[in-house]
Structures are given as structure tokens and as C-alpha cells.
Image (cartoon, rainbow, N blue to C red):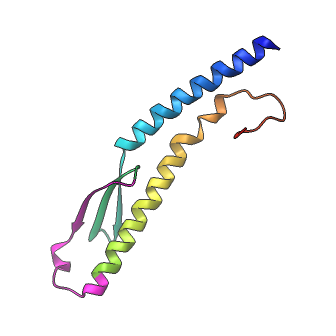
Amino acid sequence: MKGGLGNLMQQAQKMQEQMQRAQEELANLEVEGQSGGGMVKIIMTCRNEVRGVRIDNSLIGEDKDMLEDMIAAALNDALSKVEQASKEKMSGLAGGLNLPPGMKLPF
């Protein structure tokens, strides 16, 4: 039993290291949200830091309300992509941990 607990602790430590590495990778991963067929683009990291906003010149001087709606849509698209990228990155981490029957995460 003692060896099993030690093995479980090693697995948990390895999983924690992998999670930290994945979080660091996500901090540097950029996604691009778009609206209006690419006329408005927002680039952001998976830590929800907006790195850039691109607005097609043809929209400048257009309807202000429409432009605001397109910016909001592009931001929501980027946030959706951040969530998806984070889920994909983190999904495989707990799979390598061999928990005893009946034990689930979080503890």
C-alpha cells in the first residue's frame, strides 16, 4: 500500500509539472477572432490578453453601432477560441494519473 501511495504522489507531481508547462504554453499561444468576414480581427492570448485589433479601412466612417457590434462579435469569437484551445491543451493531463478505484479529481 505504501508503494502505491508513493507512486500516486509521483504521478500527481508529474501531472502538476505538466499542467504548469501547459499553462505557460497557453500564455504564449495567440488566437484570432473575426467578424464581418474578416473585416474585424482581434488577436489575443489564451490568458485573455488582447494583443491587437485590426479594422478594415472600409469600415472607418461607417455606421458606429455596426462597427461596435462587429468588434464585440470578434472579441467573443476570440474568447471562444481561447476556451477551446485551453480545453484541448488541458484535456490529456489528468489521463496519465492512475487513481485508485472510486477516487476522482478534484479530491
> In the rendered view, does 97 fall on the left or right side of 55?
right
* Image quadrant where residue 64 sits: bottom left
Residue 95: image location, x then y, percent: 66, 33
The reply to whether residue 59 is in sight is: yes
Q: Work out which quarter of the rendered image holds the C terminus and state it.
A: top right
Q: Give the vertical position of 52 relative to 62 (above or below).
A: above
What residue range appears in magenta?
A: 48-66
Q: How many marks?
A: 0
Q: Residue at x 64, y 18 (%)?
A: 10
Residue 33: image location, x then y, percent: 36, 62
* Image quadrant where residue 72 sits: bottom left
Q: Residue at x 24, y 88 (%)?
A: 63
Q: Give the vertical position of 32 relative to 11 (above or below).
A: below
Residue 59: image location, x then y, percent: 20, 79
> In the rendered view, does 37 fall on the left or right side of 95?
left
* Image quadrant where residue 66 sits: bottom left
Q: Residue at x 72, y 26 (%)?
A: 98
Residue 17: image location, x then y, percent: 52, 27
Q: Work out which quarter of the rendered image holds the N terminus and state it.
A: top right
Q: Nearer the viewer, residue 1 or 99?
A: 1
Q: Is residue 57 magenta?
A: yes
The reply to whether residue 36 is in sight is: no
Furthest toward the top, the residue is: 3
